[in-house]
Image (cartoon, rainbow, N blue to C red):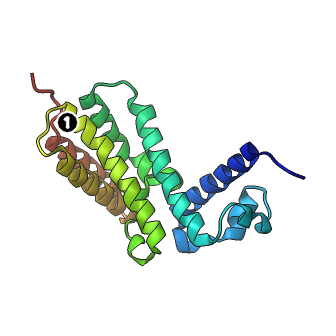
Amino acid sequence: MRYDSEHKARTRNAILVEAASAIRERGPEGVGVAEIMSATGLTHGGFYAHFKSKDELVACAITQMFDETRARFAKRTGDLPPADALTKYVDMYLSRAHRDQRSEGCALATLAGDLPRMPAQARQRFTEGVELLAAGFAHHLKKLGARNAEALAWSVLSEMAGALALARAISDITRSDQLLRSAREMVKSRLPLTQNP
């Protein structure tokens, strides 16, 4: 049976969504092509109609993760003023829900530790994703009149990703919650959340 190009694009997207979720949960080394294809209702043989290798799948799934993160940011902040948008994003990012829902979480906190051991294509996709995320954050900071908005965006994203990764790693849930609360307060204290007149 022959399928149109839209069917192929939908199938590829379904594979990427499943791969992104699985990679967040188990890391890129803990994910197999056969399980991804099975989870999307496809055969292992059909994989090669969409990707040349597992390495290509992982690289494309990384882009998918960052696309999903930016889409969630846009959906949650909508047309909010910049200060409100940044506040809402920080509160969401450093929340118990984000900590506990790894399969839907940000690629930044999930993959940063794995990337140095991954192929160049995956690292490139990760770099592109982080750059777009930082640019979006910096865009809001510039609207608030922040000096060195790009540097501040990179610094704050690094701090939030590190705090989230630590909160996920700490076995004491009370301590983990406390870390998230402290990180939210400290990050917001560094941001110009009142617009200059």
Task: Look at mark 1 in the image and give the residue it sits on.
Answer: 142
Residue sticking out furthest to the top: 197
Q: Residue at x 72, y 69 (%)?
A: 34
Q: Going by the image, does 148 lie left or right of 24?
A: left
Along the line of sight, the residue nearer the viewer: 15 or 76? 15
The image quarter in which residue 175 lies: bottom left
Q: Going by the image, does 8 lie left or right of 106?
A: right
Q: Which amino acid, by three-letter code, is at mark 1?
A: Lys
Q: Residue at x 54, y 74 (%)?
A: 29
Along the line of sight, the residue nearer the viewer: 74 or 95? 74
Q: Is residue 94 visible?
A: no
Q: Residue at x 65, y 69 (%)?
A: 52
The image quarter in which residue 74 lies: top left
Residue 66's x, y, as percent?
45, 51
Q: Is residue 117 above or below residue 11?
A: below
* Mark 1 Cα shell of 10 Å, populated few (<14), some (14-19), many (≥20): some
Residue 174's x, y, as percent?
33, 55
Q: Going by the image, does 128 lie left or right of 6?
A: left
Residue 63's x, y, as percent?
49, 55
Along the line of sight, the residue nearer the viewer: 188 or 176? 188
